[in-house]
Amino acid sequence: MDIPRIFNISESAHRIHNPITPEKLATLGAALRLEPGAQVLDLGSGSGEMLCTWARDHGIVGTGIDMSQLFTEQAKLRAIELGVADKVTFIHGDAAGYVSDEKASVAACVGATWIAGGVAGTIELLAQSLHTGGIILIGEPYWRQLPPTEDVAQGCLANSISDFLLLPELLASFGRLGYDVVEMILADQDGWDRYEAAKWLTMRRWLDANPGDELAKKVRAKLNSEPERYATYTREYLGWGVFALMPR
Ligand code: SAH
């Protein structure tokens, strides 16, 4: 079981697989007023940066589930590197339908809401693992400006304009699902650059080292086109944020 190999290649050097920066991740951890010993569940935990740094900085304990074997291995190594291997557990697996035995103070899905069929389904799934008074974290894109055409939405690698909402609409949608929005941290274009542009050097180095690989042609084509595509579409049109929610 694994995610498509192209992501394990292009994001192999990423600690954070999203446009949030280490600084903003730290700001989010502080904003949530995490108590030592608080249980944090993270579905789609990637390379584990959120759980590992929050374990180091706030003494949380956590479990992360991710379908990428590589990212999960990297998360375990990061936990050792930060001295928190006794506080965090990383499981390689499918997070679809995952409900924890022990209820969490924070139940998160940061940039992987397809796991439960979208934002609403993911909130519903996370709610099943949440302690009374706990906080759900959803990391999700939104439109900074509405794409004028479906072609522009597809340039942002969305299927259609209807995939995402404008920020006020996204915030309102949480209310309609019965949740208070109690905090939010928004990515900016510099953060997008750290997520997207960091893939380019990784792809270039991978190509130099693996010229005969079956994916080399695809990676080469991506490296040729990604900088211009990204600057034209994603960087201009797509916003991204982590939203903290509590049931009303
Ligand atoms: N939250 C992390 C990773 C976000 S990227 C961070 O912010 O860094 C999305 C992650 O979802 C990737 O790590 C990918 O491997 C993982 N993923 C995709 N489908 C999944 C599934 N069905 N179950 C668990 N993880 C999944």
Image (tube, helix red, strand yellow):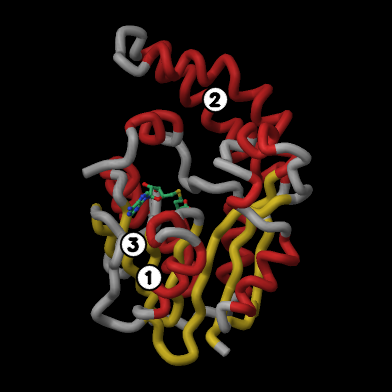
State whether residue 201 is above or below residue 193: above
Q: Of the residues shown, which amino acid type is indicated by label 2?
A: Trp
Residue 144 position within the rendered picture, expressed as x and y whole percent measured from the top left: 75, 50
- Label 3 – label 1 distance at C-alpha: 6 Å
Residue 143, image x and y in percent? 71, 51
Give the labeled residue for mark 1: 41
Q: Answer left or right for 45 relative to 159.
A: left
Q: Is residue 143 left or right of residue 210?
A: right
The tag on residue 200 is 2
Whole-Å distance between the Cαs marked 1 and 2? 31 Å
Residue 147 in which image quadrant: top right
Say which of 185 and 128 sits in front: 128
Quadrant for the C terminus in the image: bottom right
User: Does dot 3 land on a helix, a strand or a loop?
Assistant: strand
In this rendering, would 38 be left or right of 243? left
- Image location (x, y in percent) of residue 47: 39, 49
